[in-house]
Image (spheres, grey):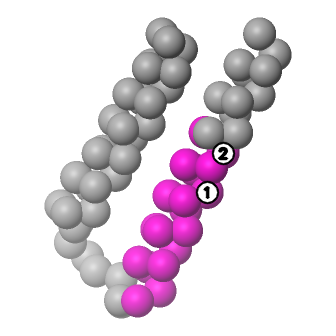
């Protein structure tokens, strides 16, 4: 069971590091805007749902 937890924590850490890298790269390329970027919100929701689906499939399998 501890290897399952370790693998899950590794995957979560990997995806969170990738998401922070992407967010940091996007913020440095353009000036901050007063408007909420709908595309970025949709992409963030999609990443989150893919992570949840991956974790559910990993735990069910």
Q: Which residue lies furthest to the right in this view?
A: 2
Residue 13, numbered circle: 2
Q: Is the magenta stretch mostly helix, strand or loop?
A: helix
Secondary structure state at the residue bearing disc 2:
helix
- Percent across and percent down for residue 36 are 23, 65
- Given residues 45 and 14, the one toward you in this image is 14
Say which quarter of the image contains residue 40: bottom left
Q: Name the residue under label 1.
A: 17
Does 19 sit above or below residue 54?
A: below
The residue drawn where x is 71% and y is 19% is 4
Whether residue 21 sits left or right of residue 41 in the image: it is right
Q: Is residue 47 above or below residue 2?
A: below
The magenta stretch is 12-29
Instruction: Examine the rendered structure and indicate whether residue 51 appears above or below residue 41.
Output: above
Q: In which quarter of the image is the N terminus?
A: top right
Residue 35 has which mark?
none
Labels 2 and 1 touching (C-beta < 8 A): yes
Residue at 46% from the left image edge and 68% from the top image edge? 23
Q: In this view, does 34 lie to the left or right of 3?
A: left
Q: How crowded is mark 1: few (under 14 residues within 10 Å), some or many (20 or more)?
A: few
Q: Is residue 35 magenta?
A: no
Residue 26 at x, y = what percent? 41, 78
């Amino acid at each position: 069971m501890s290897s399952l937890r370790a693998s899950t924590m590794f995957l979560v850490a990997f995806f969170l590091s990738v998401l922070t890298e992407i967010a940091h790269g996007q913020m440095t390329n353009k000036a901050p805007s007063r408007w909420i970027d709908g595309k970025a919100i949709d992409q963030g929701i999609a990443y989150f749902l893919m992570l949840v689906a991956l974790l559910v499939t990993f735990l069910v399998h």
